[in-house]
Image (spheres, helix red, strand yellow):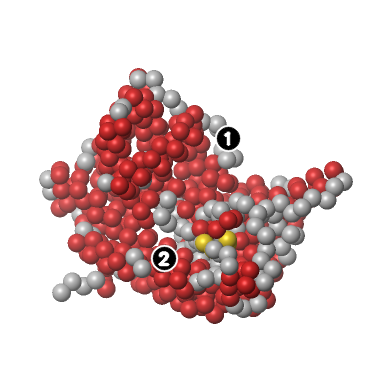
Amino acid sequence: MLDFAGTMTPEEWTYLVVLLISIPIGFLFKKAGPGLKKWGAAAVGLGLTLFTCGPHSLHSLVTILGTWALIQAQPCSCHALALAWTFSYLLFFRALSLLGLPTPTPFTNAIQLLLTLKLVSLASEVQDLHLAQKKEIASGFHKEPTLGLLPEVPSLMETLSYSYCYVGIMTGPFFRYRTYLDWLEQPFPEAVPSLRPLLRRAWPAPLFGLLFLLSSHLFPLEAVREDAFYARPLPTRLFYMIPVFFAFRMRFYVAWIAAECGCIAAGFGAYPVAAKARAGGGPTLQCPTPSSPENAASLEYDYETIRNIDCYGTDFCVRVRDGMRYWNMTVQWWLAQYIYKSAPVRSYVLRSAWTMLLSAYWHGLHPGYYLSFMTIPLCLAAEGYLESALRRHLSPRGQQAWDWVHWFLKMRAYDYMCMGFVLLTMGDTLRYWASIYYWIHFLALACLGLGLALGGGSPSKRKTASQATTGQAREKLREE
């Protein structure tokens, strides 16, 4: 009989228990008043933090207090200051062992990662509010509240309650302070559906969990670190990265679906479908507040704001570029909003490289993160230039064949990059990549060179066309 219990680490069991407990807790908070939601959710989150992190909980408190002080001191420029402060603290946080200080627990690291995103976003929201108020004073006209704008600058206690809210505190999804505020002030929460959306979202999770246990048991990652692995034939070494990435995906699918279910149980992130909410960002269209329970119940709601994973999109989208959008979606929104848009360069590929570099830093200091993330811009450039040069000249049947080949190579590229993400060290990552002759790197360089030689355009100049063909390609794959 297979011993699946030993496949998961004690930390993974703890994460799973926390995620599952958050679902019934969510149902308890859903219909509570704003005060109970605010302080009750913060108390649960703080309790989880103290239980899993112990004295290392001080790191989160110091980060919160430092950010709040910057917001109070420089509201006009607090976004850049908060980004510099929180990312600098991450460096100190990860260098503790080198300084001879106690090493934080993995749970402390997880909380610190999500807290960094939340505090940078909060500072940006406060800065937007302050600039809007200055414009209003200068113009002398009172304007209607802008969509997504905060009503006022949060106090220290409100900042602490947002930071320690138990929702997504260890695993995500990321959410803005505006989203959190909308949950606290949600009109007629009893009219917002939870059970049915939760069941629709949760049903594939047990299957994904079983597939994770099976694949990680049959193809353990530790085998790649052993000398005997490199005595195996080349086809075996090439194949091995496929089940490793498969197990990696299944693991996160389960975690993120469970995290989303915790949000859904609480009615957290629920908005009318007409608001056209985006993962991480929230509503993009203004919707009138329902005036009665009957009016609220007549609306159709979705939970796109806290959606963190599109499993089908991740597995079956055609391009490397699109695969990034469907994975860890709320964090991808954060990266696009606060890193990509403010990159010091204009080129799409260079902006992507800048974003991937900071994303790798946010994940940690392990060289494997940087080797993997910095391969993505090369793949983006290669697929962009080659597709621009060739795909549009093909017949519809030829384009369909192109999309299938493109999808296959996209999956192999992510298999390849995943090995750096899970092996972590430079030695282990380069040893594995060298054993399969760095084939994704060489293939990407060849495709980039061919695309340039054939006159392919820069990906940044084809954004609109790319989005249109992406939808067509996914529909073709779905029909097949």
Q: Characterize the local packing of mark 1: few (<14), some (14-19) or many (20 or more) Cα atoms within 10 angstroms.
A: few
Residue at horizontal 20 percent and vertical 54 percent from the top: 226
Circles 1 and 2 in contact, beta carbons < 8 Å? no
The image quadrant that residue 452 belongs to is top left
**Image coordinates for residue 139, horizontal then vertical, percent:** 85, 43
Q: Is residue 313 above or below residue 167?
A: above
**Pick the front one: 121 or 279:** 279
Mark number displayed over residue 263:
none
**Image coordinates for residue 258, horizontal then vertical, percent:** 42, 68
Q: Secondary structure at mark 1?
A: loop
**Image coordinates for residue 432, horizontal then vertical, percent:** 25, 46
Looking at marks 1 and 2 on the same chain, the residue that comes earlier in the sequence is marked by 2
Q: Is residue 47 above or below residue 459?
A: below
Mark number displayed over residue 344:
1
**How far apart in space, not on screen, are marks 1 and 2 (Cα)?**
39 Å
Drawn side of residue 223 relative to residue 473, left or right: left
Q: Secondary structure at mark 2?
A: helix
**Pick the front one: 156 or 318:** 318
